Image (tube, rainbow, N blue to C red):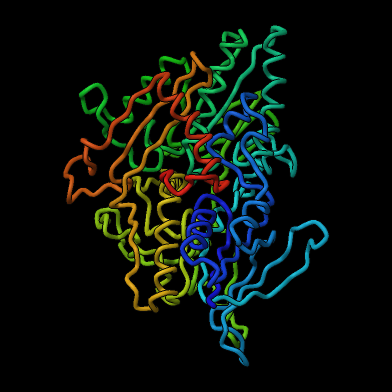
Amino acid sequence: MARLIVMGGGVAGHTTATFAKKWLGEEHEVVVITPNSQWNWIPSNIWVGVGQMQKKDVVFPLAPVYEKAGIDYRQAFATEIHPNGKMEDDKPYIVISYTQEGKVGETEELTYDYLVNATGPKLNFDATEGLGDGKGGLGGHTVSVCTADHAVHANQELSKIFEKAKAGERQKILVGTGHGLCTCQGAAFEYIFNIEHEAKKAGVRDMLDIKWISNEAFLGDFGMGGLHMKVGGYAVSSKLFAESLYAERNVEWIIGAHTSKVEEGKIEYELLDGTMHEETFDFAMLIPPFGGVGLKAYDKDGSDMTDTLFAPNGFMKVDAKYDAGAYENWKASDWPVTYQNPTFENIFAAGIAFAPPHLISKPMTSANGTPINPTPPRTGMPAGIIGKAVAHSVCDMIKKGKEAHLHEASMAEMGAACVASAGKGLLTGTAAAMTVYPVVPDYEKYPGTGRDTDYTFGEIGLAGHWIKHILHHMFIWKAKLKPGWTFIPE
């Protein structure tokens, strides 16, 4: 019997574990290690953050789902990987620390035959002074929608702002990125327009000044270098698409910005031209930068080998070209295909946990030498597709041997769909529904735009909102392993 350990229970980890168990059956063991007792459909957190959904609508307990599937679930987080085992035993293992009630802080060693790192990101609030933990604690002055609890808190604080606006006090709202190296601009994009939408419904829009701040060099970059998409039969840049939406909703913007410090009601930020500025606010939701979760790796003699498995940012090395060098040398083929670690063939990474070879957007540095550019998105649909491919590979290796063909899921050959909410409502909601192919542009195959414009298109309207709402229920159904779950695409 082989044992597969999946570290992480988010989109990538949950997908990997559930498909692997389905394909392996009772003959082999699948173990999931995740510190969270509940699964969170993160794309709907923005609706919790404006009071249009409750926390219970976006989470569910993992234990019953894994018990039903026959998956060994440990509510814990991994702290160490020992890929060569111990001096007296070559069996590789990981060290976990329990977060489960009654076992908090207890540690355990778990051996494995195959290991998948799907730990997702560390929300690095500490990267910016005063950004805090998203709950108003640790000296933080902003809110977050990165977790369901964060979103609940964000809605509580936003409600206070609306009440002040109703009382005749003009309020300033700031939404965007809280550091020059943030990713996940999409979540902030959705949140700012849902705030604007709810303000109209509450009759306080005229009392709110709403402003966007981002590390993008231009609106609509989204960490993908922007895109050209078919809209109404014409090829339109995401820059024009985004600028039109911001202007239509009367939302001002600051771009190419690195938020360097947050204080009560004020941020300091640096622009690409090197100038320093301040912006005041009454309410701010700033996404933190992401980093690896801090896993350490040790050889059998106890020596540290973290650098062998992980890049400096804490994400796991896979089959990518990490020495591509300058931007002019970057190619779509630099991106990983199998997500197998180059040193240990029984270790894979999926979702945000893998280290990208470089940015997708053009790297930017301020006149002072400060990097200000979005880091590559690896969430949502790509995370699920990668998780399923990794599960395929591991299952084939277990059943056919280590020489089995590995399944491929390069983001440079992968299309993705995104539905970005711009306001919730059965008849008044809107969302931008977009497809992009491929996610990582391939300028050799598609000169000029880097993408196939026949498969890269977008529309904004009520239909997009209905699609996003339907997808919310579909993906929670799928994650709960309800009947027919395998037929719902990643």
Classify the position of the N terminus by image quarter: bottom right
Q: Tell whether 419 sits left or right of 329.
A: right
Instruction: Tell me residue 95's x, y (percent).
Output: 66, 72
Front-most of residues 234 and 21? 21
Q: Quadrant of residue 100?
A: bottom right
The extreme bottom residue here reads: 88
Front-most of residues 399 and 342? 399
Q: Residue at x 69, y 51 (%)?
A: 37
Q: Residue at x 35, y 61 (%)?
A: 336
Instruction: Tell me residue 52's x, y (percent).
Output: 61, 24
Front-most of residues 266 and 373? 373
Q: Tell whether 249 sits left or right of 319.
A: right
Do we see residue 180 in this rendering?
A: yes
Is the residue 180 above or below the residue 266 in the image? below
Q: Tell whether 149 sits left or right of 8.
A: right
Is the residue 487 above or below the residue 241 in the image? below
